[in-house]
Amino acid sequence: MQDRQLVLTRKVNASPQKVWRCWTDPALIARWFGPAGYSCVTREIYLVEGGVWRFDMLGPDGTVWRNRHRITRQVPPSRIEFLMDGDDDAQEAMQVVVTLVPEGQGTVVTQTVTFPTEAARQGALGFGADRLGMQTMAKLAGVAETL
């Protein structure tokens, strides 16, 4: 399974409750989700277990990527699981698990993405998904630490 996973971890100087809010408040998630220079335009959002977030991620060059997150499990304020895809069923979705673990006055956020195949993981790494994912985590920290 590890050959299909990408694991991103960052310490955020905010409580798990504040980080949880960033993941589950429709007014906050689009402010930070995506790498530096990218933005999200929400088409549908219901951030609860069984809910969905459909959005377009806009790249700095104007490229649009359709996205769908289907929330499969939530354990407030410590765990979120969702399926992530291009808002269609053309390819198998990635499974994402986000954990929020208190540490001191902050939270260790770990996001584990399990790709359907090793080749899909290698393709994502080829375009810099690890580096771009850490930029996204930095944006999350920036929002959570100001709440």
Image (tube, helix red, strand yellow):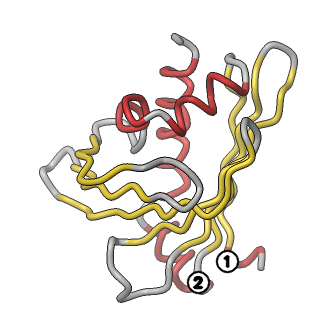
Q: Earlier in the sequence, mark 2 or mark 1?
A: 1
Residue at 58% of width from left, 15% of height from top? 145
Residue farthest to the left, as pictured: 62
Residue farthest to the right, as pictured: 104
Residue at 38% of width from left, 64% of height from top? 68
- Percent position (x, y) of residue 93? 50, 77
Q: Residues within 10 Å of mark 2 (few under 14, many from 20)?
A: some
Q: Are marks 2 and 1 in contact (CB under 8 Å)?
A: yes
Identified by mark 1, the residue type is Arg
Q: Is residue 111 left or right of residue 21?
A: right
- Percent position (x, y) of residue 85? 42, 71
- Which residue is tagged 1? 4
Residue at 71% of width from left, 38% of height from top? 109
- Which residue is tagged 2? 116
Q: Is residue 31 left or right of residue 8?
A: left
Identified by mark 2, the residue type is Pro
Residue closest to the eye, 8 or 56: 56
- Percent position (x, y) of residue 115? 59, 76
Residue closest to the eye, 129 or 93: 93
Residue closest to the eye, 122 or 88: 88
Q: Residues within 10 Å of mark 1 (few under 14, many from 20)?
A: some
